[in-house]
Image (spheres, helix red, strand yellow):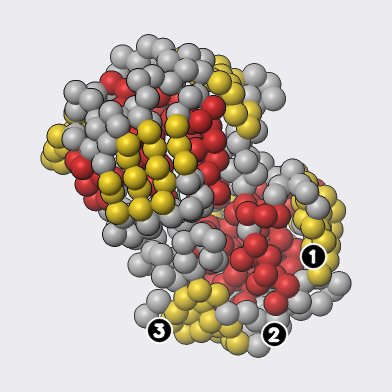
């Protein structure tokens, strides 16, 4: 099992390019199941989860070709298998995103229930309830969701909780439903908006994506098209925090400063000097130690839960006391236990971590538990005294393209060891 060996204490400096957003690429690839003609998708990140999704589509009979510049061409004119098997779903919960498209286009879907994961139970009741409201018969038995409908019809759905993939699944299902669907209390994440842009390119009729009320007028069929995936705001935030923690100066290209404003605001509060361009962000820490900040995760446009672990790592070595409150997931402090092994002074009370920054974390062997927790541990290793070995970094590879290469480009002393 690969590990990352990091020698800390090097201020990051230089320029890297940000990849396409994982959490936009995954629903968009699932959405190709709705298209009757070929679709070309560019700026697809080269990640384990993307590879898993492409494998899932191919197992269904979808024709997938990738060119050398990572443009993906998908032809879902013929789909013979309408099931997402457990062995694929268990490695990637986002497989649930094929449920809506399969029922909408083919009238039937078998999707394995995605299990929980390290950060929480991750139920999909809102996905199922929404499909039932649209007329699907859905049985959840022996680990599978079996959904079928002659043709879905429009519905007025109010989400009990803001759910990103729930919004995405039902928005995709509604594109081919008979009549109008209204999604209220919908997720406003930029990845939802990017998916809507993709679907409208295929001929879908969607209004309000990016707001909490999305209206979809169903059509009989969707054609083909092309789409460029938007930049990954979480990858962007992760490298900005890495520079802030190491007192460095970095420039991130092919990103978008308008989709992570809550994160940029907190980095300024921590003392970072930010320059913003249309598609680039430059952070200069001027060799300073960051100041502690208070974080409260909430649905977009508020501070993203996927940046919570990274800010715990920054607060652990910042000047002052910072609190981090996690309101989205019930168990997303796994990284705290590992940070404590590196000397971090963190107390957890319910869903709040109270972090008293220390000048220097000390290197220790640590273990990743989930995608963003592992990113937080890599950042801690970059700032710690000595050599940190991060184990189980397959979690990292699921969400960060070539993380050690990009960090090496910024001068980090990091390498992958078997
Ligand atoms: C998406 O997960 C992201 N994944 C997650 O990113 C992200 O952390 C999360 O949204 C929150 O922003 C993808 O987009 C592929 P939710 P998702 O449904 O859609 C509860 C990463 O690191 N809920 O918005 O699964 C749920 O338990 C990953 O890239 C229900 O109760 O998250 C949670 O408490 C990690 N019933 C809350 O809603 C449901 O049917 C938000 O979950 C659905 C969700």
Few, some or many residues within 10 Å of mark 1 (<14, 14–19, 20+): some
Which label is found at residue 274?
Answer: 1
Residue 319: x percent and y percent? 70, 85
Whether residue 376 can be seen here: yes
Of 384 and 282, the residue lying toward us? 282
Above or below 216: residue 54 = above
Callout 2: CB less than 8 Å from ligand 1: no
Question: For the residues carrying marks 1 and 2, which lies nearer the camera in this image?
Answer: 1
Above or below 81: residue 162 = below
Split into 4 quadrants, where in the image is the C terminus? top right
**Label 2 to label 3: alpha-carbon separation:** 21 Å
**Residue named by callout 2:** 319
Residue 70: x percent and y percent? 64, 26
The residue shown at (41%, 70%) is: 327
Which label is found at residue 181?
Answer: none
Asked whether, in this view, residue 298 is left or right of residue 406, the answer is left
Label 1 close to label 2 by CB (< 8 Å):
no
**Residue named by callout 3:** 349
Of 125 and 330, the residue lying toward us? 125
Asked whether, in this view, residue 6 is left or right of residue 139, the answer is right
Of mark 1 and mark 2, the one earlier in the sequence is: 1
The residue shown at (51%, 59%) is: 300
Callout 3: CB less than 8 Å from ligand 1: no
Asked whether, in this view, residue 409 is left or right of residue 120, the answer is right
**Label 1 to label 2: alpha-carbon separation:** 19 Å
In what quadrant does ligand 1 lie? bottom left
Residue 294: x percent and y percent? 57, 79
Of mark 1 and mark 3, the one earlier in the sequence is: 1
Few, some or many residues within 10 Å of mark 3 (<14, 14–19, 20+): few
């Amino acid at each position: 099992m690969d590990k990352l060996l990091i020698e800390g204490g090097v201020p990051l400096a230089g320029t890297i390019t940000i990849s396409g957003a994982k959490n936009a690429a995954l629903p968009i690839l699932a959405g190709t199941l709705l298209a009757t003609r070929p679709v070309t998708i560019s700026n697809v990140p080269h990640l384990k989860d993307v590879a898993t999704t492409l494998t899932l589509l191919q197992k269904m009979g979808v024709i997938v070709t990738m060119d050398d510049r990572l443009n993906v061409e998908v032809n879902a004119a013929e789909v013979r298998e309408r099931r997402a098997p457990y062995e694929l779903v268990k490695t990637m919960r986002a497989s649930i995103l094929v449920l809506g498209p399969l029922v909408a286009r083919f009238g039937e879907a078998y999707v394995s229930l995605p299990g929980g994961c390290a950060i929480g139970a991750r139920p999909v009741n809102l996905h199922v309830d929404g499909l039932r409201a649209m007329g699907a018969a859905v049985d959840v038995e022996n680990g599978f969701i079996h959904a079928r409908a002659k043709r879905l019809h429009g519905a007025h759905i109010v989400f009990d909780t803001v759910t990103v993939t729930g919004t995405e699944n039902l928005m995709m299902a509604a594109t081919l439903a008979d009549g109008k669907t209204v999604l209220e209390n919908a997720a406003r994440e930029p990845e939802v908006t990017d998916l809507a842009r993709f679907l409208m390119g295929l001929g879908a009729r969607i209004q309000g994506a990016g707001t909490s009320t999305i209206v979809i007028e169903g059509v009989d069929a969707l054609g083909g098209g092309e789409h460029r995936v938007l930049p990954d705001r979480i990858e962007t935030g992760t490298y900005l925090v890495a520079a802030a923690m190491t007192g460095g100066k970095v420039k991130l290209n092919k990103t978008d400063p308008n989709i992570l404003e809550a994160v940029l605001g907190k980095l300024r509060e921590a003392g970072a000097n930010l320059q913003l361009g249309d598609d680039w962000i430059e952070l200069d820490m001027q060799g300073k130690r960051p100041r502690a900040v208070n974080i409260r995760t909430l649905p977009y446009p508020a501070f993203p839960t996927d940046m919570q672990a990274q800010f715990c790592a920054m607060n652990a070595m910042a000047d002052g006391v910072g609190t981090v409150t996690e309101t989205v997931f019930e168990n997303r402090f796994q990284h705290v236990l590992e940070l404590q092994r590196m000397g971090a002074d963190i107390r957890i009370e319910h869903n709040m971590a109270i972090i008293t920054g220390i000048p220097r974390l000390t290197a220790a062997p640590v273990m990743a538990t989930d995608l963003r927790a592992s990113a937080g541990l890599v950042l801690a290793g970059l700032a710690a005294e000595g050599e940190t070995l991060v184990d189980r970094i397959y979690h990292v590879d699921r969400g960060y393209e070539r993380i050690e290469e990009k960090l090496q480009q910024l001068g980090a002393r990091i390498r992958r060891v078997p």
